[in-house]
Image (spheres, rainbow, N blue to C red):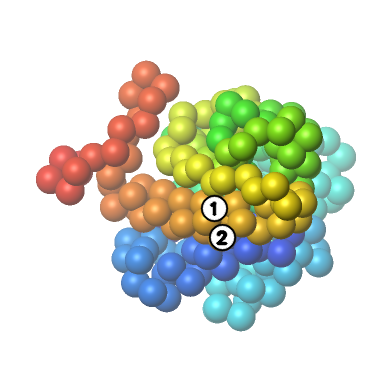
Amino acid sequence: MRVAVLVSGGGTNLQALLDAKKAGQLPEADICTVISNRKGAYALERARANGIEALYLPTTRFAERKEFHRALRDLLVERQIDLIVLAGFLVVLGEEVIQAFPNRIINVHPSLIPSFCGAGCYGLKVHEMALARGVKVTGATVHFVDGGTDTGPIIFQKAVDILPQDTPEILQKRVMEQAEWQLLPKAVDYFTRGRLRVEDGRVYVLEENEKG
């Protein structure tokens, strides 16, 4: 299946996917396109270094945000993308894209949804919120994208302990290493091998003999 990864920054989650692909853990995933809304995003360099199409599509190129979403949708449709992966993409997708790819867009979020999620909750802010609240456990979630913010059906979650000496930066790194970089490749693998099904807002993981 053809996979596009959308990213705004350094692309550490993209790298986790590339590493998984090289390790033979994504046999049915063809990571063929990386798109960023930021010209200097290092994720684009990661893509080029791996022979993957790297596209820069800034929101500022368009007078209205709807025009951006239409252009993004058209790029994805033209490339016959089967799965869209949001890996630190700091643009909330419009209905133009979501409706064109129902249950074919997944996002990774650095918390155990429904905790510390929604509008304005991204990146280091999530970990700052967790530490400020004093919770003992955090983690990461991979979910399908719907019309809300972090509200789509949950695919996988993994918990990560918060330690007394944690800073937001230390916690962010541990969540990435212990949860995000494990869950995202797993979700992509399961999707591209036909092992995920969405019914009534819930995700069901199919056994190998249930695919199709």
Amino acid type shown at disc 2: Glu
Left or right side of 40 for 154: left
Residue at label 1?
Answer: 180
Q: Residues within 10 Å of mark 2 (few under 14, many from 20)?
A: some
Given the current orientation, which residue lies at the most extreme top position? 200
Single out the mark in the foreground, 2 or 1.
2
Q: Residue at x 47, y 40 (%)?
A: 157
- Quarter of the rendering occupied by the N terminus: bottom left
| Viewer-side residue, 85 vs 155 | 155
- Residue lying furthest front: 164
Kind of residue sitting beneath label 1: Glu
Residue 17 in view in this figure: yes
Q: Is residue 107 visible?
A: no
- Quadrant of the rendered image containing residue 110: top right
Q: Residue 107, how many percent across, how many down?
A: 56, 43
In the picture, measured across the screen, residue 90 lies left or right of residue 27, that is right
Instruction: Report if the CB atoms under discs 2 and 1 are less than 8 Å apart.
Output: yes
Gap in angstroms between the C-alphas marked 2 and 1: 6 Å
Give the camera-side residue of 124 and 43. Answer: 124
Q: Which residue is mark 2?
A: 177
Are there few (<14), some (14-19), or many (20+) residues within 10 Å of tag 1?
Answer: many
Residue displayed at 34% across by 72% down: 24
Q: Secondary structure at mark 1?
A: helix
Residue 212 at x, y = what percent? 20, 42
- Left/right placement of residue 211 relative to residue 28 reads left
Q: Nearer the viewer, residue 61 or 160?
A: 160
> Is residue 204 left or right of 10 when viewed as pictured?
left
Q: SS for tag 2? A: helix
